Image (tube, grey):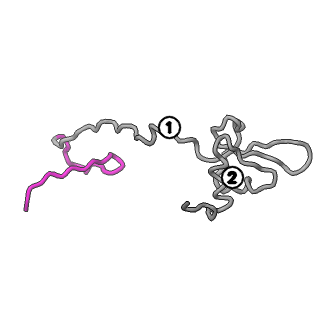
Amino acid sequence: MEAAEYRVWVRAPDHVRPVDGVDYDQVATERLEPSPQSAVREVLGERRPSGWVLAKVCEGRGPARGVLHAPDCEEAPQGAPLLDVEHALNAAEAPGTRLCTLCGCAQELTPLLSGFDHITDS
């Protein structure tokens, strides 16, 4: 048998909890430095809120019309209900609904609507 030191970083109470009747005063502990912001987060910035919102456009008679937006799009209506991906796709398939290209909604949902068959390696 060979003596070795073993360290593991755990987060209490997520990973561990004290055993009743055991004194932990002599247990060596070290405070971790705050983790640096990841390079990806630094370059891309904060993630946008998940989901989509539907802006209803009233243009006279005919079927209901609308535009799907990301929730943080400057064109998105304030206070509109947040749609999950299934409801957003259902709304996108409705006649008269278009996807906003300003906020990237079109780039996110179009592959889900039309499938990924058109994407090639070239």
Q: Give the amino acid type for the residue marked by disc 2 in the picture.
A: Ala
Picture coordinates of residue 121 (x, y %)?
54, 61
Q: Nearer the viewer, mark 2 or mark 1?
A: 1
Whether residue 5 appears in magenta in the rendering, the answer is: yes
Magenta segment, which residues?
A: 1-25
Picture coordinates of residue 45 (x, y %)?
50, 37
- Judged left or right of residue 89, residue 12 is left
User: Which of 88 and 11 lies nearest the eye of the viewer?
Assistant: 88
Q: Residue at x 23, y 39 (%)?
A: 30
Q: In this view, which residue lies farthest toward the bottom?
A: 117
Q: Residue at x 90, y 50 (%)?
A: 62
| Separation (CA) of disc 2 from disc 1 | 25 Å
- Judged left or right of residue 4, residue 102 is right
Image quadrant where residue 114 sits:
bottom right
Quadrant for the N terminus, please: bottom left
Tell me which secondary structure the magenta stretch mostly adopts.
loop
The residue carrying mark 2 is 88
User: Which of 20 and 72 lies nearest the eye of the viewer?
Assistant: 72
The residue carrying mark 1 is 45
**Disc 2 packing (10 Å; few <14; some 14–19; many ≥20):** many
Quadrant for the C terminus, please: bottom right
Seen in the picture, residue 7 relative to 79 is either above or below; the reply is: below
Picture coordinates of residue 2 (x, y %)?
8, 59
Picture coordinates of residue 118 (x, y %)?
63, 62
Whether residue 13 appears in magenta in the rendering, the answer is: yes
- Judged left or right of residue 46, residue 107 is right
Q: Earlier in the sequence, mark 2 or mark 1?
A: 1
Q: In this view, which residue lies farthest toward the right?
A: 61
Q: Residue at x 73, y 53 (%)?
A: 92
Secondary element under disc 1, as helix, strand or loop, is: loop
| Total numbered labels placed on residues in the image | 2
Q: Give the amino acid type for the residue marked by disc 1 in the picture.
A: Gly
